[in-house]
Image: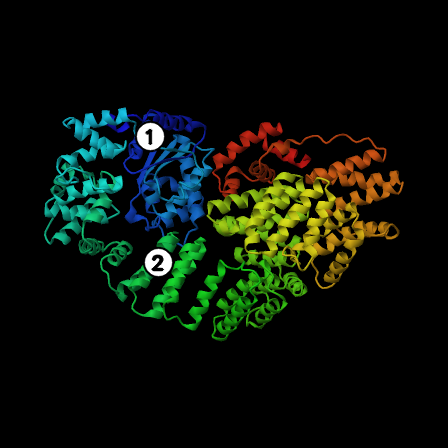
Amino acid sequence: MVDTELAGRETELRNLQDHVARLTGGGGGLVVRGDPGIGKSSLLRAAVELSEAAGHRTLLASGFESEARIPFAGLHQLLRPVLFAAEQLPTAQRKALLTALGVEDGPPPELFKVALAMLNMLAELAIAAPVVVAVDDIHWLDQSTQEALAFVARRAEGDAVLIVGTVRNGHRSPFGAAGLPEFEVSALDDATSRHVLATRAPGLGSADRDRILLEARGNPLALVELPRAWQTKEAVGEDGPLPSMQLTTRLERAFAGRVADLPGLARDAVLIAAVDYDNDLSEVLAAASVLAGRPVTLDVFDTAIEAGLLTVGGTHVGFRHPLVRSAILQEEPLMRRLAANAALAEVLTADPYRRTMHRARSFLGPDDEVADELEASHTISLKRGSVTSAIWALERSAQLTTGSARKGRRLLLAGEHAFGLGRTDLLDRLLTAAARTELSELDRARMEWLREIFSDGVPGDAARVLELCSMAEHSAATGDVDLALNLLLGAALRCWWADTGPEARARVAAVTETLPVSATEPRRIAALAVAEPVLCGTAVHELLSRMSPADVFDAEALRLLGMAAHAIGDLPRAIDLLSRSARKLREEGRLGLLSHVLTMQVHCMWMGDWDRALMVSEEGHRIAADTGQPVWTTGSTSLEAIRCGLVGETARALKLATDAEAAAGRDRLNDLLCCVQLARGLAWLGSGEYELSYQALRRLYDPADPACHLRESFAGVMFFAEAAAHSGHREEAAPVLAELERVARTTPASLLHTYLLYARAVLADDADAEDLYVTALGHDLTRWPLVRAKLELAYGEWLRRHRRAADSRTPLRSALTTLELIGATTWADRARAELRASGERVAERRASALDELSPQQLEIARLVAEGLSNKEIGERLYLSPRTVGSHLYRIFPKLNVTTRAQLAARLEEG
């Protein structure tokens, strides 16, 4: 290592040393950020040397801008030396990884199953020796590899695996945005800059030295390279002053000046190396021979090596710095770059995939033959798990296509994949381009569906809903029932998120019922339920009841049926279906949809399963962040606000409600505004501010209020009644209750019917109240422990107020037990106070050791109690077995247990 490369970097070196030294206690990730030439690569090499000196295994990779679209190219670089370890992986993970790397054929692997395989493989290697993964210019790796590395880094805390990646300032990178520890490599100070310059260019005069110091601004690469450019007049005019430009551009000019001085053959070979992402020496020489029209041998690189542009080692050729590659590609004329790609394509006969990619970069005009090859190649990208590469291939294929309709069809196909990634920006661009082509009527309908996917929250747009229904009818009439179902589900979602009026809702349901599909088709059922959750509630309930759960295996079908059950208010069925869907999605590695399912499962809080609500809320939010799905943020925020209101976290509930309202109010999304008011009402109810709670919850049942959403308001019925009873608004609440009773005669929604049991009794006159309490408690409330406990609490309070203290104790004791188990401390405290007032001595609640566990630790503990091994838990939660073990190492002392059996027993006690 050259001393001047690390001059002035003592602080950064200590940071790296600390991370490498801590590896035996657990790993993670580290982002080294900075400008081009600032010394990131030198620090990365230092990290590698520290790792190797400590006896760690080191895996290396470098990002190249030209390979960013090649699926898992970076992962192949990294894992090629250790692929033997894949044999130890579970069969499904091994298959996913090897398919992604092109080693085996198979169905398209899910990105996060590939990432989990990588995590487990590295964790297994780390048992023998800690593993350091060092990646230079990680922002130029293919997207799939970047996301996989970010996934591993976030989950390697229990494994001796450290991923260090350099990221250039101004570049977006999933790894750089993963929330990992990072440090910025700053410019050298003046004294260090002078030392580097004096060491590397000792012959400079005082005036020249000061001028270079001024221009270099402490950038180490500039301090090394600008003196050479200065002395040879390549970057300086005859009068001396440097032109005004960015330092990066100036360095590229300096490198480009050296390229221009190379002999012709050397320049050809260097250009081929610049467009060839694989850096294979024999491949570069063969293509350079084609470009030059005569044989080219290894010595062709001698002048380029002497000029400090590149290095040749073993079977590979590499550039001294990424700026050299970009300088070459900017310096060479367009026609030369096209010719270089054509020459490379000519020699890649054994690799049809890469051959097609380079052919596509070798000319400007349309070419249907290459366009067809590109469209065919996109399936290879999908098989390897790289959707971004497939999108590029389809978009470039469309650019090369002569037929307008065919061009548009290819853009729409790329758009469907962009939707799968959650990339609204990319989808908008592709649809804008497709709209300029001569689309068939079906493809135009398909385009409208794709536009609809990310716009289902536009408020009150009944005309748009009716338009989508007409498109669906036409699509079905021309034989594309699949597209018709997609359009109708999009229309239904518009009706759910915002009020589109009864005509639009009825139209969606009517068109859906006319489609020539099975009555139990999941999208059909979901469209009916989401569009008309009340009026179609009975029909959907009967369809769901008719289906045997054992007959439904598909994760997407389970998700849609779970959504339908949730929409009509059948929460127990919804939670069961969504839980099965979540298990399937985990097995398949489909984390994008898993976050949706987990977020919907948060509604189990209305039944009383608050521990589960906390776990799925935390995991759903974490996975949504991992998979880049900001579209779910507002919904999950409003549900978390409700959960906080229920558990008595008043301040947090109110803050989250305000955050959610800002987003939901902007688009007047009635569903989410209803959730916001519900969160506020619960927060104030828990803190005893009954008047504020009543006023907040009353808005849910005012049809003129933007927060009114009939189906979503079912969840507020029990709490509205409680707030009304405690704030003196019984008479005002009576008409609301009467209207809800009318709705209940239309729909079988278990959420509404169960919550009305409580509301009737709490708001009843004294003459009727006891009969209503007894009747309500006579119902089977096994799946509704919160409702049973609140009924018992309210009944106990009523009995004590009527001087029947002895009678009140039985329901109050039962209520206290259940409320404490649920974690409903606000209502548990009320039950405890009522018991004391009845004359019974009640001990204060003792804090549970389970309260000390984080949501993830609690989930791991529950899975251990179910008998799952660390390996099985890791596969379910996307953690390595060692990370699961690390969590258990911290869980055991918190619960004062030493074995898995004791842990299970402790959870059973809790």
Side of 584 relative to 691 (left or right): left
Q: Which residue is mark 2?
A: 378
Question: Which residue corresponds to the image point at 16% horizontal and 44% vertical from the top-left?
Answer: 259
Vertically, is 646 above or below 512?
Answer: above
Q: Earlier in the sequence, mark 1 or mark 2?
A: 1
Say which mark, if any, is on residue 47.
1
Residue 447 occupies which quadrant of the picture? bottom left
Residue 440 occupies which quadrant of the picture? bottom left
Question: Which residue corresponds to the image point at 29% horizontal and 47% vertical from the top-left?
Answer: 65
**Residue 269, position as x, y percentages in the image:** 16, 47
Side of 207 relative to 433 (left or right): left
Q: Residues within 10 Å of mark 1 (few under 14, many from 20)?
A: many
Q: Amino acid at mark 2?
A: His
Residue, far front: 239
Residue 309 occupies which quadrant of the picture? top left
Q: Amino acid at mark 1?
A: Ala
Side of 210 relative to 791 (left or right): left
